[in-house]
Amino acid sequence: MTTPTPRSVNLRRVADEAGVHPSTASRALNPATRHLVAAPAAGRVQEAAARLGYRPDAAAMSLRTGRSRLVGALVPGIANPVFAPILAAAAAALAEDGHALLVADPGDDPERAAEFVAELAARRVDGLLLATVSLRDDPALAACLARGLPAVLINRSGGEGVPAVVSDDRAGMALAVRHLAALGHRRIAHVGGPAPLSTGLQRREGFEEAMAALGLPVPPGWVEAATAYGRAEGEAAASLLLARCPGVTALACANDLLALGAYDACRRAGLRIPAAISVTGHNDMPLVDMIEPPLTTVRIPHEEMGRRAARLLLDRIHQGAPAGAVVLAPTLVERGSSGPPRAGEGDAGSL
Amino acid sequence: MTTPTPRSVNLRRVADEAGVHPSTASRALNPATRHLVAAPAAGRVQEAAARLGYRPDAAAMSLRTGRSRLVGALVPGIANPVFAPILAAAAAALAEDGHALLVADPGDDPERAAEFVAELAARRVDGLLLATVSLRDDPALAACLARGLPAVLINRSGGEGVPAVVSDDRAGMALAVRHLAALGHRRIAHVGGPAPLSTGLQRREGFEEAMAALGLPVPPGWVEAATAYGRAEGEAAASLLLARCPGVTALACANDLLALGAYDACRRAGLRIPAAISVTGHNDMPLVDMIEPPLTTVRIPHEEMGRRAARLLLDRIHQGAPAGAVVLAPTLVERGSSGPPRAGEGDAGSL
DNA sequence: AGCGCCTCTACAATCGATTGCAGAGAATTT
DNA sequence: AAATTCTCTGCAATCGATTGTAGAGGCGCT
């Protein structure tokens, strides 16, 4: 009755209880091999497993099979309001397939990111979600490729053979620019994201292309890249633009946090939003509808990004699916931070 | 020269390269057993390990030693702005000790939480951080205790023998109440958190005690518990209170999200904040300083909670430290949502 | 009856690192 | 010089699940 070592139940224990060999028990519990076991024996095994609350030991299984049902995620800041909902959705989608998410936060250090990839690889993760990749020659991505680890980029594009899930950043900036132009703005400046990040580059190009398509000028100096996606960095860049761009009536920002910084800069310059100047963001973070004035911004589908990225990765893990990129469509959310330019000012010097 | 299978380097490979037996290599690489190995041999092993980029296989190590250098975390919503910074800080503190964080998000379902504990236990986690525990008889906590898994509660207290890191919720509510009273408010209602959660209970009690200490009445019906910590739930509870409490001049809310809901309710009732009514929150979530008006709230030290919880858990894992609870002091952050009551109204009916 | 085939089960090796134990030499003591 | 200790290294078992292979028994066929 009393087992000498009442450790957690293992396969041998279940097999003994069912009166079969461990290998038979293993096959009876695995749906893929169950057909190799006679029905009565399989029934006894399953009954015993259920009764004892058996769970296969993940370490042993991982050691033997090489798979771990773990997926690593590299993000720059778990608390980042953009990545948090993406991770939540990805974790939910992975859980449906029996995978758990191992989150690693290397911050903005690419070397540390590569180090984390090595650590995750040593933990035998089945694949990785990378949200930290810079535009070119990222060490973390290189580390994945070198090890043959399936990887999917999120909100970052990384060249040819790498699958990625991104929002259409060019289209997103075009939405913002066209919205401002429709309100009557002609003198629009751009608070850009960090140049090494693909979102920074894409959104900047999207801004310039959309302006060109509308026949609006972008004088030199009317685009300023922030050094990071942060409120303080946004304030710094926006302050520069306000001082440097005569007659500017709108700031199209590459990111909501940058837009919040732009709010600070405008407030400091005594410019009221949207009466004196309009501001738009990008991402539609939580709570930006509650700030004053509510931020007009470009919404990217965070949950869907996480879900799609997870599915894409699972497909690659299971069957080595091709490396197609998924591009999701952003939408414009019009709120209170954008309005028509001050009468007569939008046209100043244009004709 | 060409190895037949250029798999990832394992201990045998390193040992061969250094001309020793794997067991010797193992000892040479483990600081605790290095003294058993002669210096020259140990040097060769370490050099070979470094040169080949050797990392011990986590699954094999875990299988043999029973430890995994993994810590599980159960949170209700990864994207929750309160828990995200806690997790980030905990992950950083754990990483310093070589542990990684496995995040599981069972939502608000206690049964699912217990299921997740079983899954994490099967993955041999060394310990768990529980942020989902309800006040009494939580299945997840019970599952930990049954398995003898070290666990630390975060932002929730769970009875005697369980270590926990919490903010002093009673003191926090007292800060808010005393602040409102100092401004002249006497008719204060409380938008409470969910009753089954320890924060909901503690903050409610803190509110009532602080009011009593100041000699202020809390008539029946002036406390309304929201059904969950959410904006919609906050609006519902606040609307009830506004309709039910004649002459109310301030709403002390158990949580920032509830306070945001209270904003919505006040807006709908045509009450301006803080002119017609004051509102306070709890937690000091990111961005609540940017909303209109900026939210007066009680700041709890999220980063420190995460760090302390991680350290407490590590202590328990390493040396079975005692189960003392850590209580952190909150601070009041005064912003624009609280002000003096409308002239003459704060005293209405009081004398 | 004899043969082969088919179904089912058990055996044993394997994944990679750790660790108790034993033994080979060297160093020290008597 | 012999005996004893000490230092170091190798051997082999172990953790728990998976899986290739072999063999036992039952069935149908000629």
Image (cartoon, coloured by chain):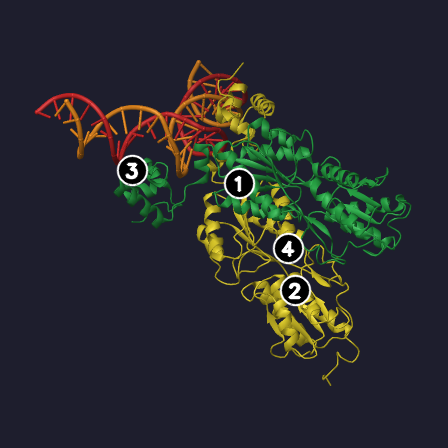
Chain colours: A yellow, B green, C orange, D red
Residue type, label 1: Arg
Q: Nearest to the eye among marks 3 and 4: give it.
A: 3
Left-right relation of A209 to A14 = right
Indicate the secondary structure of the residue bearing disc 1: helix
Q: The disc labelled 3 sits on which kind of residue?
A: Val
Q: Nearer the viewer, mark 2 or mark 4?
A: 2
The tag earlier along the polypeptide, 3 or 1, is: 3
Measured in 3D between alpha carbons, the distance from the residue under mark 2 to the one under mark 4, in whole angstroms, is 16 Å
Real-space Cα separation, disc 3 to disc 4, in angstroms: 50 Å
Q: Is residue A126 left or right of residue B132?
A: left
Residue named by callout 1: B311
Residues indicated by labels 3 and 1 sit on the same polypeptide chain: yes
Q: Residue at x 65, y 61 (%)?
A: A257
Residue B95 is situated, as x and y percent measured from the top left of the image, at 50, 45
Q: In whole angstroms, how far apart are the C-alphas of marks 3 and 2?
A: 58 Å
* In the rendered image, the vertical position of residue B60 relative to residue C2, given as above or below: below
Residue B239 x %, y %: 85, 47
Residue farthest along the front direction in this orientation: B351
Q: Nearer the viewer, residue B332 or C9?
A: B332
Label 3, on which residue? B37
Q: Is residue B151 above or below residue A216?
A: above
- Between tags 4 and 1, which lies in front? 1
The residue pinned by badge 2 equals: A261
For the residues tagged 3 and 2, is the chain the same?
Answer: no
Q: Earlier in the sequence, mark 2 or mark 4?
A: 4
- Work out whether residue A198 or residue B38 is closer to the camera in this orientation and state it: B38
